[in-house]
Amino acid sequence: MKKLLYILLAFFAVHSLSAQILDPVKWKTKVVQKSDTEFELIMSATIEDEWHMYSQYTPDGGSLPFEFTYKDTKGNYATVGKTIESPYKKVFNDIFEVDEYYFAKSAQFKQVVKITNPKLKEIRVNLYYQVCKEQCIQQDKDLIFKLPVLKITEKAVVADTDESSIEPIVPISNKSTVDTSDVETMKAADQPDTATTETPAPVTEEQKSDEINLWLLFLGTLLAGILVTFTPCVFPMIPMTVSFFLKQSAGGDKKKGRINALMYGFFIIMIYVLISLPFHIFQSLSPDIFYEISTNPYLNIFFFIIFLVFAISFLGAFEITMPSSLANKVDNASNKGGFAGIFFMALTLIIVSFSCTGPALGAVIGGVLSTDGGATLLTIAMFGFGVGLAFPFVIFALFPSMMGSLPKSGGWLNTVKVVFGFIELALAFKFLSMADLVMDWHLLERETFIAVWIAIFGGLSLYLLGKITLPHDSPISNISVGRLLLGLLTLTFTVYLIPGLWGAPLNIISGFPPPMSYSESPNGVGSKASAAAATTAESLPDHAQYGPHNIVAFHNYDDGLAYAKKVNKPVMIDFTGVTCVNCRRMEEKVWSKPEILSILKGEVVLISLYVDDRTPLPADQVFVNANGKEIDTCGKKWSDFAITKYKANIQPYYILMGHDEENLNKPVGYTPEVEEYKSWLREGIANFKK
């Protein structure tokens, strides 16, 4: 795939709007020889503060993924495996409604290549990526890796290489800005890989946010672990287990009883943490395993089936139990003395209570894996779940007087189980929705998904309010105050979901339903917007189409300028991108305001130029720019236009100009303040009328 090529002429500050050629990512490279014919190409990026560079694995529908193109491979060399990248951050994007994976501060990429042409002197690698702050930039850089003269030895080394003779490994378009000291060659067997060693940096807001997210994950799974203790499989075991440790204390060794109680809790936690360890092995074998899990439609369907089965079981159709032979063997092992016996007691609890803890455990594992959380986050989640489950057993063993405050077993335990069943059923459809999105089946579009959730939580509301009963429910003459309040809360949530059928954003559950674009009606069921657009289609100017909020927009500069002259209105150029987050945020948060929308619809001619549009140009429009780069796509054309005419490579970037193609006022970038943006529009329009 051909890439969009930029000329990086100079580096200016982010807030200088008179010239916006920005280059917020600096690259260091080196070549490491792994064997007689294999080399590792290492590319290390230093990213300026507040800028983000996106991973090659960031999901479709969001920002532009990183792309590597290894040039002239045929007959010269072959890539071995995928390009490995350093750990990235994962954040949900409420504009695109997908998780996005990005790097902040730094990133490193490694690719092993096997040389098949012994005369090969260099390897060229093209990097095509997006970096964003308040604006987004599509970056296109070529790196040249000069291969050294080799001396074959028992150890694979880089040898006989004079560093001063190596041509600097720099972007072709910007050699003058790269320090030649960035080029390194190393002896792989003798020297450490210093590229991965960094000076500790101050804690950033992003790092603080990550720490908060980890705590939220831990606290959420901790709460889940505590809640499952109030199920029919677990709750009755609390007094039985606690009595065992009390008998030890009553035997005269209170200290031993307390230590054993603590060890019992420790072993519960340890077993759940051990469940996550295989995923660390999977991740070390394949760093992108969690991305593959999160986007694999068949695994998502598998999770859907598992959650559906658990949900039906919780609702009372059947019981899920572990094999009795296994439970009996583990129970017999628990009769051993010492810590080994206590370990098997903990294992017995986990096995016997599986029919109740299994669905919650599945939610923890499936939820973390499906969001590409990584093995570390899974371990944190399992640790939190284990602590939550062990907590009541340890507390009541240490403070037996608190046992009196526990409610007696009864029908309320089945009510808790049924509530979990409804929640599991709702989560099941989230996994089915993920598979549907990836496969583009359109079986579970946004409206259908929301309708399913309305039915599920509506049914839960009726159950909690006593209007429907299920097989294992005990007869009740009235419902408790707690159950009534929970029922009202669930009913409120159900009512909240209903406007989503007509296009309401439903911010509380943002990220769970499919995005608005994946729906039967992107403008909402029954929306007048689509109908209005259809009825006015005949009056749409030639070469124009409807943009955000049905604003008439041109995607070709010449067509838009010609129309502006015809209707005697100023031109607003909108340098934008399909994958530009803040472009969408401006459109949704600023352009949607009535005072802005009226101006964009009635007082200017909008020309939206997408710099990441990969539509090929007609053969007669393909050209080579002043720097010798072939411009063969619409996106390349508009990007080259922005750089050449406006010295800008950021998006969003807005320009108001007259028919003489001169600016009416100072161009602006991302401007989230509505009044500021309105003042900018008014200033330019007033200058046009003078």
Image (cartoon, rainbow, N blue to C red):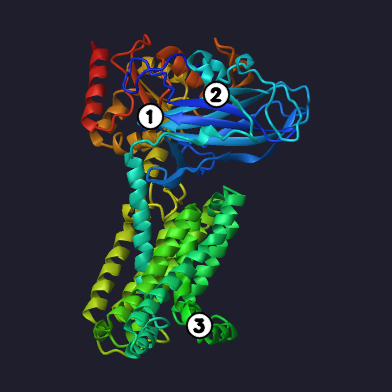
Considering depth in this image, is 482 or 188 the residue closer to the camera?
188
Q: Quadrant of the N terminus?
A: top right
Check disc 1 and give the amino acid type. Gln
Q: Is label 3 in a helix, a strand or a loop?
A: loop
How far separated are the C-alphas under marks 3 and 2? 59 Å
Residue corresponding to mark 1: 135
Q: Nearer the viewer, mark 3 or mark 2?
A: 2
Decide if residue 464 is on the left or right side of residue 360.
Answer: left
Q: Residues within 10 Å of mark 3 (few under 14, many from 20)?
A: few
Residue corresponding to mark 2: 141
Q: What percent of the width, then of the height, locates residue 521?
A: 43, 49
The image quadrant that residue 254 belongs to is bottom left
Sequence order check, earlier mark of 3 and 1? 1
Tell me the number on the disc at residue 319: 3
Res 653 seen here: yes
How far separated are the C-alphas under marks 2 and 1? 19 Å
Q: Relative to 513, is 659 above or below?
A: above
Considering depth in this image, is 554 or 303 the residue closer to the camera?
303
Q: Is label 2 in a helix, a strand or a loop?
A: strand
